[in-house]
Amino acid sequence: MEVVIMGLFFLYKIGRIILALTGVVGAVLALLTRDDAFDAADRQSKWIWAGMLMIAAALVVYQLPFLTWIGIVIIGLYWFDVRPQIKDILNGRYDW
């Protein structure tokens, strides 16, 4: 039973590290994206998104109660909503 608990704890730690790295990579990608793409997508500026993603990554790493969930939501919002829209704009696809 102890082995199972240790294995689950290890998976939990790995998951947190992967989430934090996803936030950091998202911040770097936001910083490498053109400024006008965020304006065209009607989103916050790239600096705000980069800051939010870095703070979100820190919240995930430090395991602050409830704030960790906010960090996860910010990272997910960037990767599943903001990034695809900006990528479409930069690739010339302006579909609604």
Image (cartoon, grey):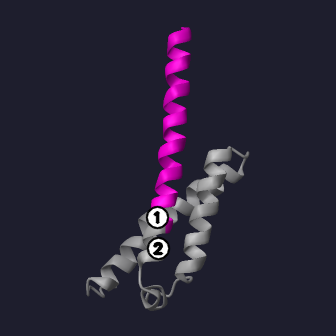
Asked if residue 8 lies in the magenta stretch, the reply is: yes
Query: Which residue is under mark 2?
Result: 30
Q: Where residue 84 sits: x, y (%)?
A: 37, 72
Residues drawn in magenta: 1-27
**Residue at horizontal 26 percent and vertical 85 percent from the top:** 93
In the picture as drawn, the residue positioned furthest to the top comes out as 1
**Residue at horizontal 47 percent and vertical 73 percent from the top:** 30
Specify the principal SS of the magenta part: helix
In what element is the residue under mark 2? helix
Classify 10 Å Cα crowding around label 2: few (below 14), some (14-19), many (20 and above). many
**Residue at horizontal 41 percent and vertical 72 percent from the top:** 83
Q: Where residue 15 sits: x, y (%)?
A: 49, 40
Q: Where residue 96 sits: x, y (%)?
A: 34, 85
Q: What residue type is labelled 2?
A: Ala
The label number, if any, that marks residue 8 in the structure image: none
In the picture as drawn, the residue positioned furthest to the left comes out as 92
Q: Is residue 59 above or below residue 51?
A: above
Classify 10 Å Cα crowding around label 1: few (below 14), some (14-19), many (20 and above). many
**Residue at horizontal 57 percent and vertical 58 percent from the top:** 73
Q: In the picture provided, is 87 more to the left or to the right than 15?
A: left
Rounded to the nearest angstrom, the CA distance separating label 1 from label 2 is 6 Å
Q: What residue type is labelled 1?
A: Gly
Query: Which residue is under mark 1?
Result: 26
In what element is the residue under mark 1? helix
Asked if residue 88 lies in the magenta stretch, the reply is: no
Q: Is residue 35 above or below residue 30?
A: below
Q: Is residue 57 above or below residue 93?
A: above
Q: Do the residues labelled 1 and 2 touch (CB within 8 Å)?
A: yes
Screen quadrant of the N terminus: top right
89 vs 45, nearest the viewer: 45
